[in-house]
Image: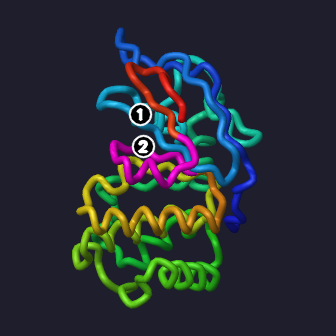
Amino acid sequence: MAATGHSSAGLAVAGVGKSYGSRAVLADISFSVRAGERVALTGPSGSGKTTLLNCLGGVDRPDAGEIRLGDLRLDRLDSSALAALRRERIGTIFQFFHLLPTLSVAENVELPLQLLRVPAAERRDRVHALLERVGLAGRAAALPSQLAGGEQQRVAIARALIHRPGLVLADEPTGNLDSANGANILALLREMTEEARPILILVTHSEEAAAICHRRLHLRDGRIVKET
C-alpha cells in the first residue's frame, strides 16, 4: 500500500478529558485545526500538553470527548486501527530524536515507507529527495551516533514527513538543541510544513518555536485558558 498523503483532513477535538486514577490531567479540551495550520500548545510543566499530544496521536485514549481526524474518530478506534492510523496518517518528532541507532540515516527515514509496503524503488527515490531537501543527502550512510544534534533532528523531521502524513505532532523539537541549531530546525519545520500542508501541533516552552505557528493554545491545569 503506497502512502498517498492525507493533508486535506482537519482535526476536531471536542470535550476531551483524561485522568490517571483520581488525578484529572485534561478537562473539557475543545478546538479545531484546519489542514495546513500550525498550532502551538504552550503552558507550564504539568499543564497537560504532552498528554493532549498523546491523545491526538492515538497513544493515549481520552476518558471523555471526541477526537476526529478527517472522517475518523480516534477515540472509537481499537488498538490495531490506531496503530494503522499512526503508520499512515501521523508523523511524530521528539525532543530526543528517537532515531534507531543501528540504522543509517537513509534507513531511519525509509522505515515508515517500509511499514506501509511502499515499493523499494519509490522508497529510494523519496528518501533521496527528502534527504536532499533537509541537506543531508551526503550523510545518508551515516549512523545517528555520527551526527550532531541538529543533524539528527533533521533526520527525525524527514522521517516524520516521508509518508506524507496529514497530522504532524512535535514534542519540544528544539528542546535538546542549542539556540542556533534550534533556529535552523524551526525554519526547516516551517518551510516543510508550508510545502506539504499537514496540520502541525507543536508542544513547546519556547517563544521562538511558538512564533512559527499560526495560533497558540495556552494550557493550565488541564484546560485551555487562552488562545492567541
Q: Residue at left 36%, top 49%?
A: 172
Residue toward you, 37 or 100: 37
Can residue 176 be seen in the rendering of this structure?
A: yes
Could you tell me which quadrant the C terminus lies in? top right
Name which quarter of the figure residue 129 lies in: bottom right
Which kind of residue does numbered mark 1 sit on? Lys
Q: Who's the residue at 35% across and 74% down the image?
A: 103
* Residue 185 horizontal/vertical position (percent): 39, 66
Which tag, 2 or 1, sits closer to the chain's start? Answer: 1
Q: Residues within 10 Å of mark 1 (few under 14, many from 20)?
A: many
Kind of residue at disc 2: Val
Q: Is residue 1 above or below residue 127?
A: above
Q: Which residues are magenta?
A: 200-215
* Residue annotated with mark 1: 49
- CB-based contact (under 8 Å), mark 2 and mark 1: yes
Label 1 secondary element: helix
User: In the rendered image, which residue does mark 2 sit on?
Assistant: 203
Residue at horizontal 28 percent and vertical 68 percent from the top: 180
Residue that appears at 64% across and 68% down: 195
In the picture, measured across the screen, residue 169 lies left or right of residue 183, that is right
Q: How is the image coloured?
A: rainbow
